[in-house]
Image (cartoon, rainbow, N blue to C red):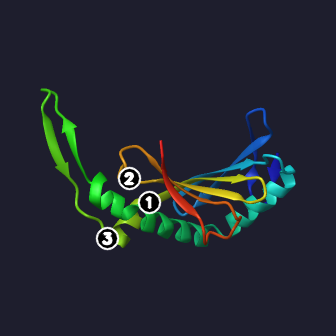
């Protein structure tokens, strides 16, 4: 399926979900369109709205992730023990990150648009959370005022 804004929409499984790849900054971002119990056109329109405001929503989501998880990183996840080949452990202590440093480590790599109101931003976190993904979700469409940031994986 071809779409004017989202370009090629590939089928994603049997449920009628679609995937689009868009250029954002210097990388490709996967946009997953999941109609859930809505008409495909409804979810497509929300996805178009997200893409049209992607820079703004990314900034808001990134800030939300910072507010909800920077202290978690600085207080817990920046220090850990790493197993060595000989079986011993080496303590690793990464620096405490400022707001700007934390936000710089997050890069948007996927967006899920579900139904008519759920939007989730998925971030690569430069391994700050040891392979987990930072996900920021709004259940109120483009209104991210009450969005939640979580670690996934």
Which residue is at the front of the view, 3 or 64?
Answer: 64
Residue bearing mark 3: 98
* Marks 2 and 3, the one that precedes in the sequence: 3
Q: Secondary structure at mark 2?
A: loop
In which quadrant of the rendered view does residue 130 lie?
A: top left
Residue in the foreground of this view, choosing between 19 and 123: 123
Q: Is residue 27 above or below residue 55?
A: above
Query: Is 153 left or right of 111, judged from the image as shown?
Result: left
Splitting the image into 4 quarters, where does residue 119 fall?
bottom right
Where residue 36 appears, as percent x and y from the top left, is: 78, 46
Classify mark 3: helix, strand or loop.
Answer: loop
Residue bearing the label numbered 2: 126
Residue 144, compared with residue 37, is above or below; it is below
Q: Position of residue 120 (x, y in %)?
A: 62, 55
Mark 1 secondary-structure assignment: loop
Please give left or right for residue 96 compared with residue 104 in the image.
left
Please state the horizontal and vertical placement of residue 74, each as a whole percent of the image. 29, 61
Left or right: residue 37 compared with residue 62: right
Q: Are marks 2 and 1 in contact (CB under 8 Å)?
A: yes
Residue 5 in sight from this viewpoint: no
Distance from label 2 to label 3 (Cα)? 15 Å
Label 1 crowding class (10 Å Cα cut-off): few <14, some 14-19, many 20+? many
């Amino acid at each position: 399926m071809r779409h004017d804004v989202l370009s090629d929409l590939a089928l994603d499984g049997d449920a009628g979900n679609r995937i689009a790849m868009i250029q954002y900054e210097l990388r490709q971002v996967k946009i997953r369109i999941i109609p859930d119990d809505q008409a495909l056109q409804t979810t497509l329109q929300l996805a178009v709205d997200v893409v049209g405001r992607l820079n703004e929503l990314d900034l808001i989501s990134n800030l939300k992730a910072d507010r909800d998880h920077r202290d978690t990183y600085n207080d817990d996840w920046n220090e850990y023990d790493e197993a060595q080949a000989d079986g011993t452990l080496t303590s690793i202590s990464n620096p405490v990150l400022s707001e700007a440093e934390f936000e710089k480590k997050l890069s948007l790599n996927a967006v899920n648009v579900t139904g008519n109101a759920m939007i989730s931003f998925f971030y690569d976190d430069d391994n700050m959370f040891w392979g987990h993904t930072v996900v920021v979700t709004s259940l109120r469409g483009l209104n991210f005022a009450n969005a939640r940031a979580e670690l996934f994986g």
